[in-house]
Image (tube, helix red, strand yellow):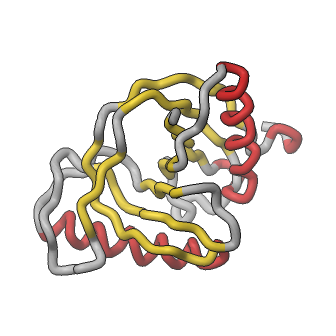
Amino acid sequence: MDEGNAGLAREITRAQLTEQPTAVVRETVPLNALRAFFDRAFGAVMGVVQEQHAQLAGPPFALYRGMPTDVVDVEAGFPLAAPVSGGGDVTVIAGVLPAGPAYEALHAGPYGSLQQTYAAILARMRQDGVSPAEAMWEYYLNDPGAEPDPAKWQTLVVWPVA
């Protein structure tokens, strides 16, 4: 991929989502503390998943409520095959990714350029005459710890329709 295309969504598609149970940690976090929050949240959720012998149903994700500013209302965790009950870690709660129409785009590149993909999805929504929902989420398809080259990171952006 050449440098001029880094971070751009390859294709924006419409999707019809089905409700998906999750286990998450939800907090209001300063934008510059997201990485530490993700490390803590994903670790806590994995602990509860293992404790309850729950089955993962997809990659880790983060759901954002409203467009991030310098502080963001975020929940991070994993989709599950079935809901979890309260676990030993009281910060982990059962959640759900909602059903309904959405737009999806695969973002390739560093997380810092995700705003380009969000802008492209929003432009497509406006072109199609629909409004975005307040919440949107990202599936992290590879682990930055295992893949140190940000140009190879892939993030599936999902933005439901209001």
The number of numbered discs placed on residues in the rendered structure image is 0
Residue 92, how many percent across, how many down?
27, 71
- Front one among 16 and 132: 132
18 over 82 or under it: above or below: above
In this rendering, would 42 be left or right of 111?
Answer: left
Q: Residue at x 68, y 30 (%)?
A: 10
Q: Which residue is drawn at 55% across and 76% down?
A: 29
- Front one among 6 and 17: 17
In this rendering, would 155 be left or right of 112?
Answer: left
Q: Which residue is drawn at 24% across and 60% down?
A: 94
Q: Locate the N terminus and report the quarter of the image it occupies.
A: top right
49 over 60 or under it: above or below: below
Residue 110, how many percent across, how many down?
70, 55
Q: Which residue is drawn at 55% across and 30% down?
A: 103
Is residue 130 shown to the viewer in this render?
A: yes
Is residue 138 shown to the viewer in this render?
A: no
Dividing the picture into quadrants, the one containing residue 125 is top right
In this rendering, would 75 be left or right of 78?
Answer: right
Residue at the outermost right position: 4
